[in-house]
Amino acid sequence: MAPLTRNRARPEDDVPMALSAEYYAQRAIAGLLISEGTQISPEGKGYAWTPGIYSEVQVAGWKSVTDAVHAKGGKIVAQLWHVGPVSHDTLQPDGKPPVAPSAIAAESRTFDGKEFLPASTLRALELSEIPRIIEDYRKAAANAKVAGFDGVEIHAANGYLLDQFMRDGANKREGVPMAGRSRTVPASFWR
Ligand SMILES: Cc1cc2nc3c(=O)[nH]c(=O)nc-3n(C[C@H](O)[C@H](O)[C@H](O)COP(=O)(O)O)c2cc1C
């Protein structure tokens, strides 16, 4: 089953609840379920009521989901998500601007719980912040294991953070060319 955002997490702490366990268990017969996009950090959130996988209580919520799916004979992987610029100040920690590879506005809309709004003015990530985000992905993957998922899928499409890093139109960062798709991280970063 393809990943489908449902906006059903508990509003105050982005925890998947009993309704999510019921929803995924009902679909266990699909065989392999990919979870809805699940933010790796508070900064990775772009829409109201989407679940996270960075806190203990969120991991416990997901455990009830994976248990319910496994009880019905299904498999489920967590889709790890950082929305990058597709967010709104009001959804970000301390009302800060959303982040992106470069300060180029995302022509996209976000949902703040009341209405769809244009994505907020964003800020370009400092190079020094990138290890923090990689660490957030690492922790989220480790949390997915604790939560009983059968694997993870890294969301790197649809104009979200990782997709933006791979697109010339959104990524104007300068650096030493690297092998592979990214050409923006200075070689010194990888040493
Ligand atoms: C309501 C809705 C929510 C979606 N949420 C996600 C999501 O969280 N993560 C994701 O990668 N794709 C998401 N998608 C995209 C779908 O997984 C799927 O790729 C898309 O609908 C195209 O499917 P198709 O190629 O089979 O037509 C969503 C699509 C819809 C309609």
Image: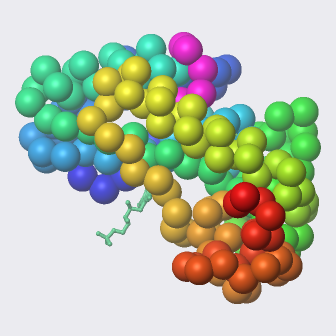
Q: What main secondary structure does the magenta stretch of the protein show? A: loop
Q: Could you tell me residue 138's position as x and y percent?
A: 56, 38
Q: Is residue 66 visible?
A: yes
Does residue 79 appear to the left or right of 54 in the view shown?
left
Does residue 169 appear to the left or right of 94 in the view shown?
left
Comparing 137 with 31, the one in front is 137
Q: Is residue 52 magenta?
A: yes
The image quadrant that residue 163 belongs to is bottom right
Comparing 118 with 84, the one in front is 84
Q: Is residue 73 magenta?
A: no
Position above or below: 26 against 120: above
Q: Could you tell me residue 139's position as x and y percent?
A: 57, 32
Does residue 146 appear to the left or right of 164 in the view shown?
left
Q: Could you tell me residue 65's position as x and y percent?
A: 32, 24
Residue shown at 85% from the left, 79% from the top? 174
Residue shown at 27% from the left, 36% from the top? 150
Position above or below: 63 against 113: above
Q: In this view, which residue lies farthest toward the front? A: 191
Comparing 48 with 61, the one in front is 61
Residue shown at 72% from the left, 58% from the top? 191
Q: Is residue 114 visible?
A: no
Residue shown at 80% from the left, 64% from the top? 188
Residue extent of the magenta highlight: 51-57
Does residue 165 appear to the left or right of 21 in the view shown?
right
The image quadrant that residue 162 belongs to is bottom right
